[in-house]
Amino acid sequence: MADISQKSNMGKKRKTVEYGRYGYLFIAPFFIVYAIFQLWPLVYTIWMSFMEYYSKGLKEIGPNFIGFKNIVNAFITTGKEGAVLFDTFTFKALGNTIFMWMLNFVPQILLSLLLASWFTDTRVKLKGQGAFKVTMFMPNIITAASLAVLFYSLFSINGPMTQLLKNMGAIPGNYDFMVHKLPTQILIAFIQFWMWYGNTMIVLIAGILGINPSLYEASRVDGANSKQIFYHITLPLLKPITLFVLVTSAIGGLQMYDIPSLFNVNQGGDGLPDFASTTITMYIRKLTLTSKDFGKAGAASVVLFLVTLIISLFFFFVLGEKEDRRQRKSRKGV
Amino acid sequence: MSSQVIEVKESKKSENEQLESLSKNIKRQKLFRNIICILLCIMSIFPFYIMIINATRPSAAIQQGLSLIPGTMFFTNISKLGSLSAGVGTPVMKAMLNSLCISVPATLFTVYFSSMTAYGVYVYNFKLRRIAWSFILGIMMIPTQVSIIGFYKFMIQIGLNDSYLPLIIPAVAAPSTVFFMRQYMKTALPLEIIDAARIDGSGEFYTFNTIATPLMKPALATQAIFAFIASWNNLYTPSIILSSSTKYTLPMFVQVLRSEQFRSDYGVIYVGLLLTVLPLFIVYFALSKYIIAGVALGGVKE
């Protein structure tokens, strides 16, 4: 009897091992393509950041190993007043990117939270929610490049929106959004906000609907009002999803390219006015295609990579910790 | 006794009043919220509305100000756009065709190979399974933009610059789609079905293609929509890889609209923009239900 069960066990084991090999075949295309088209370019980029490597006319100079010089140059400018940290084009572009992302994200998450709480409110039921959602989400799908050119046309000096605002007396008669730094940045942030708040709202609605309804019932029975329920039940339980939205938005925002690169730029691809709307990806592209300074572009990419890495690690740690705690708790419960 | 009855009656009365004021309050809230939502919807539509109107107006009229009534110059603007963009190298229709040539195969690759990878990790028990899965989760957060310079130089070295291949082949490795497909398999693909297929003598790849894939159809469709839109709207990688103007994709055509040749004629710019967003409008209004459901599903993947 024991013999038989052992045998069948062995048979099972052999079977899984046999089929297990197919797993490698199934995942092979993914990993091969990833290694060739993404992992190797990433390694190559990092390698380039250690090289003196650029084209001058038709002549290519380098690659010569120069250590951390490119990366240090991305962090520090050495001028007459000595070394100044973060006063470089790389960090200016990074700063512009982060600033414009924040200008878009803060109002975006607040409005999305408000709308999500409205759409899931069981006491004040809104009719036509489907139509609202479809309309608010729509800009998200449309080609960002087209939206950038559309908004540029609307808000340029003779554009219809500028004219409208002038007629309303909101701005002086000869005002031009495109020669001022902050208005340009605000407009870019607005386009991002306008494109993404619908998306964030739908994600948050899904999150709220995923919260156990009995919690709401219990709090209602205990006499909590809508405000209390929102602040003490919805918000705390929505934290992981809000965090998820924050991190994906931050990483996406760091790569911001389509809108600023077609909004207020000159023919060379610099964000006007005075570099204020140049994002880090625009800067990297310019170093690659126009300046052809690959070492410098590599260093700027490494800076972008590090910032992205820090953000995603933060995400994994905060959420991972939570998961651990939850698991430990459930184990204790058992 | 009678005084008690009166008291009870009074308290009932005040309760009724309270309820009434509460329902009034709810009504007021409802009105307020509806107004805000309608304003937001107008904000979503208004820029597109101006775009459509201005596409039908002559350039001089557009410069004079806003109008909400369409003009009559639509076809003139379209023919002008045709002659102007012929000078640049890529007419709109050619750009759309180019975009299709990239987006369709890229979408098929993403969907097929992602579900294949997810299937491999989900169904089979092999030594590196856990490591492979953690790796896929880890790289999900790394955007392609950070390695663009290495990608560009590498493509030049292997002679693939100015070709569509570097825009299509990398679609095979789409970690977030793999993640989504595996989450879906957990609920929609019982392992017993695969075992049953094995007993019936079906080969592993045959099982995947003819039994697993049909069960995954809803998820495949959602992911296909998103992959297609992402590839169609992509500007960064094509604008670095493609250099000859006959190969321009649709977003790159939009880039051309910003250039000197078009700067003087506003009507033509708006017509060009209208033509670039029109296909997406159609796709969106046909599939909005699935798209919004897909966004909601993707968000709760945590």
Image: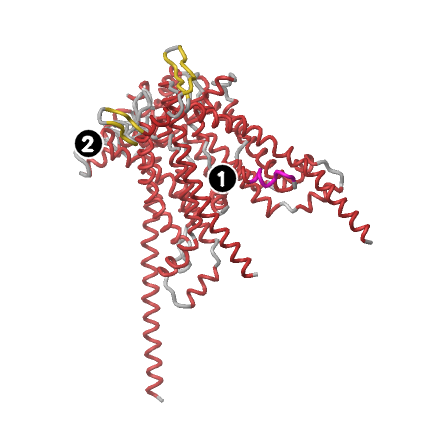
| Mark 2 lies on residue | A175
Comparing B188 with A161, the one in front is B188
Residue B154: percent from left, percent from top: 49, 21
> Does the stretch in magenta take in B223?
no
Asked whether residue B131 is drawn in magenta, I would say yes
Q: Is residue A175 left or right of residue B122?
A: left
Tag 1 and tag 2 share a subunit: no
Which residue is rendered at x = 64% and y = 34% of the image?
A24
**Mark 2, residues whose alpha carbon is within 10 Å: few (<14), some, or many (≥20)?**
some
**Which mark, by number, is residue B287?**
1
Q: Which percent across, then down, holds residue A103?
A: 31, 40
Residue closest to the eye, B169 or A132: B169
Rendered location of residue A178, percent (x, y): 25, 29
- Marks 1, 2: nearer the viewer: 2
Residue A62 placed where, x, y %?
A: 42, 15
Residue B66 visible in rendering: yes
**Label 2: chain letter:** A
Query: What secondary structure characterizes most of the magenta part?
Result: helix
Q: Is residue A131 visible?
A: no
